[in-house]
Image (spheres, rainbow, N blue to C red):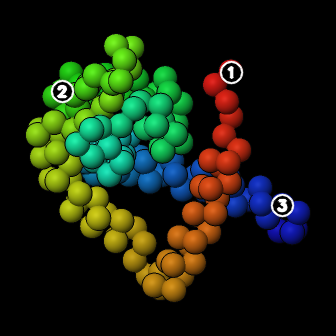
Amino acid sequence: MREENLTAWICTALMRIGTRMATGFDQHFAGHGITQAQFRVLLAVWQQGGADGIAPSALADHLLIERGTVSVLTNRMVERGWLTRKRGKNRRTYHLALTEVGEQVLQEVIPHAEALADDTLSGISLDELRNMRTNLECIETRLRDHAPTDE
């Protein structure tokens, strides 16, 4: 591989890995009735929102997804009783917060997700994992700093 193709190779590898990991999660957790996208939303609302919840726009920014995708995902999760919409500072805004049912689903799935992550990354040394985290944090920061606008 030529050096000038290295960045393209890494980016396409990350996309392939992300697709495979999402598919594997969905297959692994089908019996729990949750997808990886729903899991990521529940986890983000729990970690980022606290008791007050999180604005859908902030959730989209955190997850690096489109705001319309957040609406589609969260509408279904509200219907299932996993999330609730709390009134925002004015009548046009709201925040998403976990319900008791949503928190139960999340707490049930977290240990399984951690075990799947451990299995997926087994055989990689702790130092390599730390370096990988540092590199992925750099990529994520770059993506956040250069996010496309909704215009």
Residue at 35% x, 37% y: name it. 54
Quarter assignment of residue 10: bottom right
Q: Nearer the viewer, mark 3 or mark 1?
A: 1
Label 3 neighbour load within 10 Å: few <14, some 14-19, many 20+ = few
Query: In the image, is residue 57 above or below residue 134?
Result: above
Q: Percent position (x, y) of residue 90?
A: 36, 17
Label 2 neighbour load within 10 Å: few <14, some 14-19, many 20+ = few
Q: Earlier in the sequence, mark 3 or mark 2?
A: 3
Residue at 68% x, 54% y: name it. 142
Residue toward you, 9 or 43: 43
Residue holding disc 1: 151
Residue holding disc 2: 80
Residue at 28% x, 59% y: name it. 113
Q: Cα distance, mark 3 to mark 2? A: 45 Å
The amino acid type found where label 1 is placed reads: Glu
Residue 5 is left or right of residue 9, and the answer is: right
Q: Earlier in the sequence, mark 2 or mark 1?
A: 2
Q: Cα distance, mark 2 to mark 1? A: 32 Å
Query: In the image, is residue 21 above or below residue 95?
Result: below
Residue holding disc 3: 5
Pointers 3 and 2 in contact (CB under 8 A)?
A: no
Q: Nearer the viewer, mark 3 or mark 2?
A: 2
Please tell me whether mark 1 sits on a helix, a strand or a loop: loop
The amino acid type found where label 3 is placed reads: Asn
Q: Percent position (x, y) of residue 33?
A: 20, 38
Please tell me whether mark 3 sits on a helix, a strand or a loop: helix
Residue 116 is left or right of residue 55, and the answer is: left
Q: Percent position (x, y) of residue 9?
A: 74, 59
Query: In the image, is residue 108 above or below residue 89?
Result: below
Please tell me whether mark 2 sits on a helix, a strand or a loop: loop
